[in-house]
């Protein structure tokens, strides 16, 4: 009985030692499908491999093998490559007789200097033989939300402040990042302003408001003079109060560019005066048939509120000051097509916080 218990314990320990971690299982599945593709060279095999990388986080490849394939086939160089480029380079290499093997897969999640809980990490040796020969050590990143591979990158070790060897990975181009922040804005016409800014992946959006605190008015004067005594004059005075815009942006890493669309609210005073003297009136007077009479009128309205269409093209830059916070700087231009006197440059400063971790 005692021997049986010892045997069961040893068998249990052996099975636990052989059990694969989630990251090893996903990368092992990737390795099997890649091996099958190299052997069969079939479209179905490449499609099954590609599906392992089509997750919620857009795939990126930046390992030594991908860089070597790009150089071999004369592709445009980049810091990282999308899934289409990765599959395309593998397809060409495999069609030319190259065999690619992934071996010695090991979970490295605890060794990676990363605080994200939604990512797992596994190292592996990648070996290419045949017409194209190459050997490298890579890190595969697995997204736990869908068990898809979202990144293949170089294996790089660094020593931390405590003297421990840690695996360093640049995660800045993974596309599931989200953030929120604000900026305080200023321009000459609207000295008090603010924006609430949020981002998801490459898309950023802000709601912008600004207020005018002075009582300066902008005058629009239109005169339609037919003769010196026959005219119509229209005078409008505007007092801007506030603006509201919504701004979609294209966002990438430390840079965003967008164009806000909204309106300016302003109070408006409107006065129309006219004076009229016709040729018949003049002729009758010259003929001695009466006096020279001119008709005149004046109408006005005050206290009305008008909305004017507004555009706010803007550029934002983000300067990291910690792992989760960036200083946000912006420069833009207020454009009011129907009242160009309100056009002008605006600027802003604030903070943006990473909310994806």
Image (cartoon, rainbow, N blue to C red):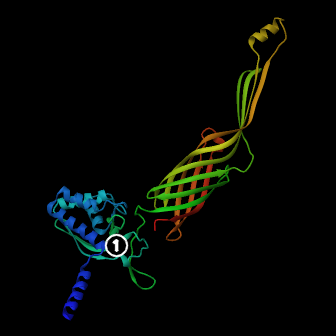
Res. 157 visible in picture: no
Res. 105 visible in picture: yes
The residue depicted at 69 percent of the width and 44 percent of the height is 240
How many discs mark residues in the rendered view? 1
Residue closer to the observer: 22 or 324: 22
Tell me where residue 276 sits by quadrant.
top right
Please state if 335 lies on the left or on the right of 281 as rendered: left
> x%, y% of residue 164?
40, 84
- Secondary structure of the residue carrying numbered label 1: strand
Q: Which residue is mark 1?
A: 121
The residue depicted at 26 percent of the width and 57 percent of the height is 88
151 over 267 or under it: above or below: below
Please state if 297 lies on the left or on the right of 69 as rendered: right
The residue depicted at 41 percent of the width and 76 percent of the height is 113
> x%, y% of residue 6?
22, 91
Quarter of the rendering occupied by the N terminus:
bottom left
> x%, y% of residue 263?
60, 44
Say few, some or many: other residues with alpha carbon within 10 Å of mark 1 (under 14 / 14 to 19 / 20 or more). Answer: many
283 over 321 or under it: above or below: above
Tell me where residue 236 sits by quadrant.
top right
Residue found farthest to the bottom: 2
């Amino acid at each position: 009985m005692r021997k049986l218990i010892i045997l069961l314990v040893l068998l249990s320990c052996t099975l636990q030692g052989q059990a694969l971690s989630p990251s090893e299982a996903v990368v092992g599945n990737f390795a099997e499908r890649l091996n099958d593709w190299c052997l069969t060279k079939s479209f179905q095999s490449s499609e099954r491999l590609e599906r392992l990388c089509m997750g919620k986080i857009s795939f990126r490849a930046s390992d030594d093998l991908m860089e070597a394939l790009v150089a071999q086939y004369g592709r445009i160089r980049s810091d990282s490559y999308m899934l289409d480029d990765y599959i395309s380079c593998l397809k060409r290499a495999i069609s030319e007789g190259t065999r690619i093997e992934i071996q010695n897969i090991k979970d490295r999640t605890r060794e990676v200097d990363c605080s994200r809980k939604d990512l797992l990490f596994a190292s592996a040796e990648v070996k290419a033989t045949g017409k194209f020969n190459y050997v490298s050590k890579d890190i595969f990143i697995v997204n736990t939300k869908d068990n898809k591979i979202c990144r293949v990158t170089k294996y790089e070790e660094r020593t931390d402040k405590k003297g421990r060897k840690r695996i360093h990975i640049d995660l800045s181009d993974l596309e599931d990042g989200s953030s929120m922040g604000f900026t305080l804005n200023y321009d000459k016409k609207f000295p008090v302003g603010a924006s609430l800014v949020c981002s998801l992946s490459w898309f950023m959006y802000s709601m912008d408001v600004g207020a005018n605190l002075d009582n300066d008015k902008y005058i629009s004067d239109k005169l339609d003079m037919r003769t010196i005594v026959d005219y119509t004059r229209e005078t409008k005075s505007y007092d801007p109060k506030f603006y509201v815009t919504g701004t979609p942006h294209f966002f990438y890493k430390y840079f965003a560019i967008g164009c806000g669309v909204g309106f300016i609210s302003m109070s408006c005073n409107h006065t129309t005066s006219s004076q009229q003297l016709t040729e018949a009136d003049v002729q009758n007077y010259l003929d001695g048939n009466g006096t020279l009479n001119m008709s005149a009128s004046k109408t006005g309205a005050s206290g009305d509120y008008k909305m004017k269409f507004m555009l706010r093209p803007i550029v934002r830059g983000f300067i990291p000051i910690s792992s989760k916070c960036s200083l946000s700087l912006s420069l833009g231009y207020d454009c009011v097509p129907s009242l160009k006197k309100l056009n002008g440059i605006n600027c802003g400063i604030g903070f943006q916080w990473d909310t994806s971790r």
